[in-house]
Image: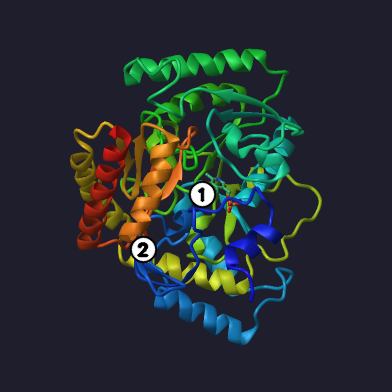
Amino acid sequence: MTAPLHQRHRAVLPQWLALYYREPLELTHGEGRHVFDAQGRRYLDFFGGILTTMTAHALPEVTKAIADQAGRILHTSTLYLDRHMVELAERIAALSGIPDARVFFTTSGTEANDAALLLATTHRRSNQILAMRNSYHGRSFSTVGITGNSAWSPTSLSPLQTLYLHGAVRSSGPYAHLDDRRFIEACVADLEDMLGQAHGNVAALIAEPVQGVGGFTAPPDGLYAAFRQVLDRHGILWISDEVQTGWGRTGDHFWGWQAHAGNGPPDLLTFAKGIGNGMAIGGVVARAEVMNCLEANSISTFGGSPVTMAAGLANLGHLLENDLQGNARRVGGLLLERLRAAAAGLAVVREVRGRGLMIGVELAGAEAAGEALEVAREQGLLIGKGGRAGNVLRIAPPMSLTVAEAEEGAALLERTLRQVDGGERA
Ligand code: PMP
């Protein structure tokens, strides 16, 4: 008899490959905002596989685009012209807000940030990077070197020199007690101080407008605009990592950087996850002057492959035509309200925060969060986990979430939180 799948997984894959749940879950298919496991059990999906399901599971337009393209020519390489790649690049360039924008496609967020770092360090002739404490930017050699969250940064041997800044987490750290204006002032002073400690040129600041792995935490609006004023004086580039915050997920804005738009768009923007709705698409957008600073040729064999680009175009088209950003704002607002009400009076909940369909529920500790994940699953609800202490529940459903599904999920989460709260006290 063959061993259960999770044992075979453990036996052959790296031990550090994170896997959710005591009894790991095998998903076999999805439909709308729901997924089904190998036993046929249905779950309301409030995590979308870490925000990768942007619109809906098995969205017919995306499935059709993939099938059409796969039936023609699955993939050659990006050495040949392909209309899907050009069209998607045109759409993303126009949406990015970056003037004279150029787009380079990759196959992941890690690779997108890696490319952004290559561009910024080459353009500025510097290997010094400013990054935020508690950040996550990927798993490659370069991106672990700019990841502030040590739980996700397994080596300190990075070739980059990284200076970590305060500001991305509003509710803890030395400035947490200050009001928003003074919080921003203190963070700017910290940035100036760090620049005083740098060795000459600094290449770039990279930041997630809302930290994802860090636990859906955001600075006060305007922090990065205030940083930008200082960066501009030194010619330092601003890279906005929009891997989790892009495509209208935060409701009020299409990109997370727009909450910090005082001094215009970032110099570079990176994206991944949702745009492919499960297909491997990542990329970096930059002003032509920055993008074209590389002197040698470069190519990504699979980044921008026709089948993924066709999927991305269909997915983005659906998002825009159905105003899923507006939906994220409306339904996310309702969900936040419901969850705040559900959490009121529960000792186990420290904070419920969020924007659009990116909601974090901070609990008393990692144990409570782990328990909540298990209990939610038993109730038929999938959620995520994050935060530096592993104590934040992450809620980021597909952006087509309906009001009825939001109400249903909120009720399931309320039951979950009550059960965990009871357990804590017992
Ligand atoms: N940046 C951010 C903000 C992310 O959340 C992630 C993935 N969690 C990445 C980069 C890396 O993306 P990928 O896993 O596609 O390499």
SS assignment at label 1: loop
Q: Which residue is mark 1?
A: 243
Q: Nearer the viewer, residue 163 or 149?
A: 149
Q: Quadrant of the C terminus?
A: top left
Q: Residue at x 21, y 59 (%)?
A: 403
Q: Quadrant of the N terminus?
A: bottom right
Label 1 within 8 A of ligand 1 by Cβ: yes
Answer above or below: position of 111 versus 185: below
Q: Residue at x 44, y 50 (%)?
A: 246
Q: Amino acid at mark 2?
A: Leu
Residue 150, x across and y down, in percent? 60, 32
Q: Residue at x 39, y 64 (%)?
A: 55
Answer above or below: position of 40 versus 24: below
Q: Nearer the viewer, residue 219 or 396?
A: 396
Residue 137, x across and y down, in percent? 59, 42
Q: Which residue is mark 2?
A: 320
Using a 10 Å C-alpha cutoff, classify the residue at mark 2 as few (fewer than 14 neighbours), some (14 to 19) or many (20 or more): few
* Separation of residues labelled 2 and 1 (CA atoms): 18 Å
Answer above or below: position of 103 versus 130: below
Residue 292, x across and y down, in percent? 69, 48
**Mark 2 or mark 1, which has the lower sequence index?**
1
Q: Amino acid at mark 1?
A: Val
